[in-house]
Structures are given as structure tokens and as C-alpha cells.
């Protein structure tokens, strides 16, 4: 290990300033934190129950990661880079769950065009691969720790997607929307599974309203 390592002050991610790839990969390690911000922003902008369900699965995946680490108790390859156990990699598992769940969700919704489905899947899988690679490159985890994290995240992500489908099938999601007061309080709705792009939908609605307004002015 090079003793002249530095780190991003607000993240405490160490990188080698003499390595051109080290800083970009250190920044990529922040993608899970960015996704948490995206989750929060998406919920307060769209108020979709689907976002809540995905976040619930993400939290359960993180709890599973902590449980596995406490049971396996395998140290990180370089203890000076981080505290806690390294098997499985939390970053890799987080991103694998994210990619697996979104891939399954995307494939299950026919209102997306094949091109949009492919681009979305390539994007989320690419992000997951980038973060996972960064954890090995920066010496925070061994390849095995990252591989196990990916495997656990993918399996849990796909399993959670099936669980969500089951909850919808038995009416649990509808019950929550109808009877849990927080759903009314936060105006939570369930349209993500039935509508297309909300950006396109809102744009089309705006165009229609604009045309109607101009028509009234012209009369």
C-alpha cells in the first residue's frame, strides 16, 4: 500500500492521488448515498407507494448485510481503510439490490418501449458494476467479498420484487393505501405500475391545457 493516501473529507473515502482512476472511483463509491437522496426526492415529488416498497426492500437488504457480516466475521483486506467486517460488501449488495429490483420492475411493465427498457437496465447494471469495481480497486474489499455482496443483492432484489407482486395480489398494498392514515397524510398514490413516463404524461397534459387556453382566447 502507498502510504501517501488522502481522502475526500466529507466522505472519508481514501484514494491514491497519483492514480488517475483512484479519484473517479472514490467518487463513484458515493453513488449509494446519491441513490438515497434520489429515493427521498422521488417520493416527495411523486408520492408513489412503489418508491416506499423499494426503499423498504433496500433497508431489509442492508439489515441482512449487517447480519451476514456479524455471522461471517471476515475482515477487510486492509483494516486501516475501514472499520467493521468486509463479507459481504455493503456497497456491492446495495447496488445489486437496486439494479436487480429495477430490472425486474422494468421488465414487468409493458408500457415502456423495448429501447427504454434496455437503456434503463444497462444504466442501473452499469452503475452497480462501477461501484462494485471501485470497492476492489480502492482495496476496501476483496473480489470474493464483492462477489458475495452482488449475489446476495441480486437474489434479495429479485425475491423482494416477487414479494411486492404477492403483496399486490393479496390486496395488502391497496389495504395500506386505504386504511393507513400516513398514506392520506402524504398523498401517497399507486400509479407507477400503470402509467408511462410521468414527464411525458405531465408534458402532454400541459400541452392540452395550453391549447385549450389559446382556443378560448381566440374566441
Image: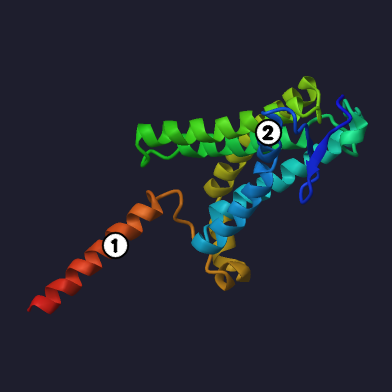
Residue found 54% across the figure and 56% down from its top: 42
Question: Disc number at residue 25?
Answer: 2
Question: What x and y, as percent, mark residue 71?
Answer: 91, 32
Residue pushed farthest left?
219
Foreground residue, 58 or 119? Answer: 119
Residue 166 x/y as whole percent: 57, 43
Q: What number is the disc on residue 205? A: 1
Across and down, in percent, residue 69 comes to 86, 34
Q: Which badge, 1 or 2, is on the more N-terminal residue?
A: 2
| Name of the residue lying farthest toward the top | 144
Regarding residue 160, the answer to whether it shows in the image is yes
* Residue at point 56%, 30% (across, down): 126
Secondary structure, mark 2, is helix
Answer left or right for 76 relative to 35.
Answer: right
Q: Is residue 175 visible?
A: no
| Label 1: element kind | helix
Residue positioned 61% across, 51% down in the render: 53
Amino acid at each position: 500500500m502507498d502510504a501517501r493516501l488522502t481522502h475526500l473529507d466529507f466522505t472519508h473515502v481514501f484514494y491514491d492521488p497519483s492514480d488517475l482512476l483512484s479519484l473517479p472511483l472514490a467518487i463513484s463509491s458515493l453513488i449509494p448515498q446519491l441513490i438515497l437522496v434520489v429515493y427521498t426526492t422521488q417520493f416527495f415529488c411523486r408520492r408513489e407507494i412503489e418508491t416506499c416498497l423499494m426503499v423498504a426492500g433496500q433497508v431489509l437488504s442492508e439489515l441482512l448485510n449487517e447480519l451476514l457480516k456479524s455471522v461471517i466475521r471476515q475482515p477487510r483486506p486492509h483494516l486501516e481503510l475501514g472499520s467493521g467486517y468486509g463479507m459481504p460488501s455493503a456497497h456491492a449488495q446495495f447496488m445489486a439490490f437496486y439494479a436487480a429490483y429495477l430490472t425486474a420492475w422494468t421488465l414487468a411493465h409493458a408500457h415502456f418501449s423495448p429501447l427504454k427498457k434496455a437503456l434503463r437496465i444497462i444504466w442501473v447494471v452499469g452503475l452497480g458494476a462501477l461501484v462494485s469495481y471501485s470497492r476492489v480497486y480502492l482495496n476496501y474489499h476483496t473480489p470474493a467479498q464483492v462477489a458475495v455482496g452482488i449475489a446476495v443483492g441480486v437474489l434479495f432484489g429479485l425475491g423482494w420484487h416477487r414479494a411486492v407482486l404477492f403483496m399486490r395480489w393479496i390486496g395488502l398494498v391497496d389495504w395500506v393505501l386505504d386504511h393507513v392514515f400516513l398514506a392520506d397524510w402524504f398523498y401517497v398514490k399507486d400509479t407507477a405500475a400503470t402509467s408511462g413516463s410521468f414527464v411525458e404524461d405531465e408534458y402532454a397534459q400541459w400541452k392540452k391545457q395550453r391549447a385549450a387556453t389559446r382556443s378560448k382566447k381566440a374566441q
